[in-house]
Image (cartoon, rainbow, N blue to C red):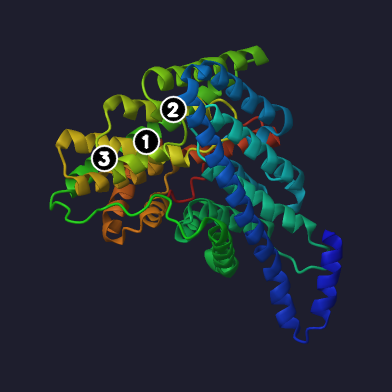
Amino acid sequence: MFKTAISLGRRLFEKIGSEKVKQNLLQALPFLVGSVITGLIAVVYTRLFAFAEHGTAYIFHASKYLFFLITPCCFVLSWWVVKRFSPYARGSGIPQVMAAIELSSPRSSALVKKLLSIKVILIKIVSSLVLVFGGGIIGREGPTIQIAGSVFWKINQWLPAWWPRISKKNMIMTGAAAGLAAAFNTPLGGIVFAVEELTKTHISYFKTALFTAIIIAGLTAQAFLGPYLYLGYPDVSRLSAYIFLPVLLVAILCGLTGSGISKLMLILFRWKKSFKKDYMHLAYLMVCALIVASLAVFVTESMFGSGKELITKVLFTNDKYSPLYVVLFRIAGPVLSFTSGAAGGVFAPALSAGASVGSLIAGWLHLSATDTNLLVLSGMVGFLTGVTRTPFTSAILVLEMTDRHNVIFYLMLAGMVASMAALTIDKHSFYDHLRAQYLHDLTHDEKPVPAIKESQPMAT
């Protein structure tokens, strides 16, 4: 069917008079098709993810003790699916896309296929849905980026020989940016993410394709989900004159904590590599799952899921201040879930962890509701920056999620300060370390690939 459509399209373009117009249309078409497909998949994935989280909540309220069985089973099943069918579908998906961009050459197509493929898409979705249903503290945004990169990569592969040459690297980068934009409904965030995190190529070489793909993917998602904001419209009016001081405090704490848990997860990954038998992985999964289930059952249900409910609670209700134990659980939760080896992202859990830190500090300082909301947003930016080292992406994402343009300078301040604080823990981001590990595993090089080239400037 695809070949038939290509043949019909070729005949149509042959009838177009201008050779320049034909070239431009042929080069734009793969990006347009990929954008629509990405938007549709993002919509389906979003609804399935929400359905899984609602299923978790329903069972929890009916019989919460069932999760002492459900959580371990889901952790094991989600890990096994990845291990058995697509090992590089594990985790977030962003480091895999970064590695694929670096490997995107004709000689490395076989390696990129392990990172981006239809099988990766299916396993990514299945594994993450199973894990979140079992109470895993993960997000869908990182997986959506790998899914979108896979879509654009496959479309590039399917193009016939007579089609005008399109850079595989640019296709993957554009797909990843479109995936983030569709997942969060944040087009500017998708653009900044591509520039700040993914691209080593000057944006002028593919800016038209990038902007077009992000717009079309976002519009496709909006056609089904509506022009929604990821979080809503928190009140950040009538801020105190001194509020920048608590913002700085929250940014420093979140930058340090985000970088700290990233380093802890990397240590756990290295430790797990020493496991020689599958039963050792199973034992680790069982321990993590039982800890998550116990905390949810005996302490707080907010331990489960991506944490979006916690963010909306502190932003839009009178229950503004998170207790310390909730903060600790939201920080520990991603460590227990992400190191399982199943599929799932850290974007949303990082945002909820930062929100809990911001609300905790606001409670300690007895701040007003509007000042508290700003600290929550600043904590989200700071914690995500501590993990990713992309302060501008983090600030723009939170800005677009809430449509609060009057606090953009506070959010950018939080991102910059958090990035500098994170450097004291580790000068490279969590994703850079994982990208290097994927490249090392794929190429079977005896010497580890450096996390980031020294000649490349750090995102600060």
Q: CA distance from mark 3 to mark 1?
A: 12 Å
Residue 271 location in percent, x, y? 54, 19
Q: CA distance from mark 3 to mark 2?
A: 20 Å
Q: Which residue is mark 3?
A: 250
Q: Which residue is mark 1?
A: 353
- Please state which of residues 78 and 409 is positioned toward the viewer in this rendering: 78
Residue 306 location in percent, x, y? 46, 36
Q: CA distance from mark 1 to mark 2?
A: 9 Å
Q: Residue furthest bottom?
A: 17
Q: Which residue is mark 2?
A: 333
Give the residue at x 54% y 26%. Answer: 134
Pointer 3 or 1: first along the chain: 3
* Mark toward the viewer: 3 or 2: 2
Give the residue at x 69% y 32%. Answer: 444
Instruction: Answer above or below: position of 211 versus 108.
Output: below
Pointer 1 or 2: first along the chain: 2
| Callout 3–callout 2 Cβ contact below 8 Å | no
Give the residue at x 56% y 21%. Answer: 70
Judged left or right of residue 133, residue 421 is left
Quadrant of res 358: top left
